[in-house]
Amino acid sequence: MPLTPGTTTQTASTESPLLVKAPFLPAFRLRRAVLIATGLATLIVSTACKREYTPAPISAQAAVKIRTVTVSGEARTGTEEAVGTVRARLRASVEAKVAGRIQELLVSPGQLVHKGDPVAVLDGREIRARLDSAQAVLEQATKDYNRTAKLNLDGAATAAEVDAVRARQRVAAAGVAEAEAMLEHTRVIAPFEGVITRKLADVGDLATPGRPLVEIEDPTQLRFEADLPEALVDGIKLGSTLSIRLSSSPELLKGVVSEIAPMAESASRTYLVKLSLPQSTSIRAGQFGRVGVPIGEIRVPHLPAATLVQRGQLEFVFVIDSGKAQLRLVRSGKRFDDQIEIISGLIPGEKVAADKLAELRDGQPVELVP
């Protein structure tokens, strides 16, 4: 029967709901799309259900041959660290002995000078004029003495007059010597061989006694100076050998106590202690360091410092247990020589990897070698 708008038949009501909602699509195309979508969904679900997960095979790790060290718990001499500074044994502030304007400053910081080398030259015109005056007085006094001495021989002058003229001549000679010395002091010289460390004046400045022009130090003779509290100074004596660690060098230095201040500094209640250092090209004046002062015997687990693994701010060691290297977090304490205290994480008697730390991983099989 012919279809009219707004009417449906029994056949249309038995079709898929999609046909009703989208009457503008051809029926055969819609059926084919539904069948294809249904088949794909069934295939995906069945495939996912039947798939079996097969883990990737784990390759066996090869054992690493390493050496070990045993965590020691033996008693050792405990130390307390004190901070200090490397300073030159021989250092001086070079000043002018006479007042005068600086005409030349012949050195600069870092320059090596020898004993007697000129450092600065002052304006000496006033002193030179004083020398000329003193020399003139000396010449006149000498003539007066010669004339009086001759008159004394002729009986025209007494012995007292001769003595008076002789005294004036000696005073004039002393004035000449003083003026010559002052003129010589217009050349400021280095008191010893060393390096200029600071320049405190420049050309045109007025040099006066008591005002340093430059500072000079001998870099070949260095010592370590530290302020020790009262509780530590009693544990050392002259000639004692202490360990010193500088901030710029990982190796320990041996310093010999050469001076101990007899009195404490009133404000800080500390004693200045000076230690002689060995000659080394890597040590420079002004470096910061720490000195270990013995405080008695203590019993704390310790290891060679080279066995620690640093990862950021954390410290680890590889503990050997049942043929495997186990990574363990530890906390270290003070260093002494090449050893380091282990505050927590280890107990005496445990074995720790001593080499090939970069090759080890947590759980890595190991083979111990002597």
Image (cartoon, rainbow, N blue to C red):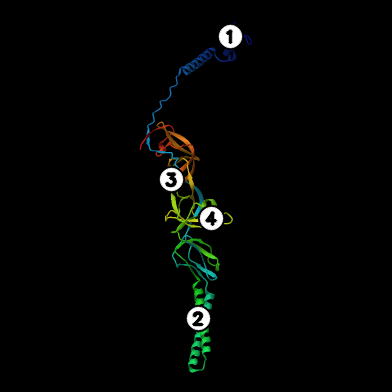
- Circle number at residue 351: none
Q: Amino acid at mark 3?
A: Asp
Find residue 284 and report its horizontal and vertical position in percent: 46, 55
Residue topped by disc 2? 173
| CA separation in Å, label 4 and label 2 | 51 Å
In this view, 218 is above or below 253: below
Check the image and report above or below for 48 versus 71.
Answer: above
Rendered image quadrant of residue 205: bottom right
Viewer-side residue, 2 vs 176 = 176
Q: Which residue is mark 4?
A: 271
- Residue identifier under label 3: 338
In the picture of the structure, the residue carrying the numbered disc 1 is: 12
Q: CA distance from mark 1 to mark 3?
A: 96 Å
Give the alpha-carbon distance from disc 3 to disc 4, as whole Å. Answer: 28 Å
| Rendered location of residue 25, percent (x, y) | 56, 15
Kind of residue at badge 4 = Tyr
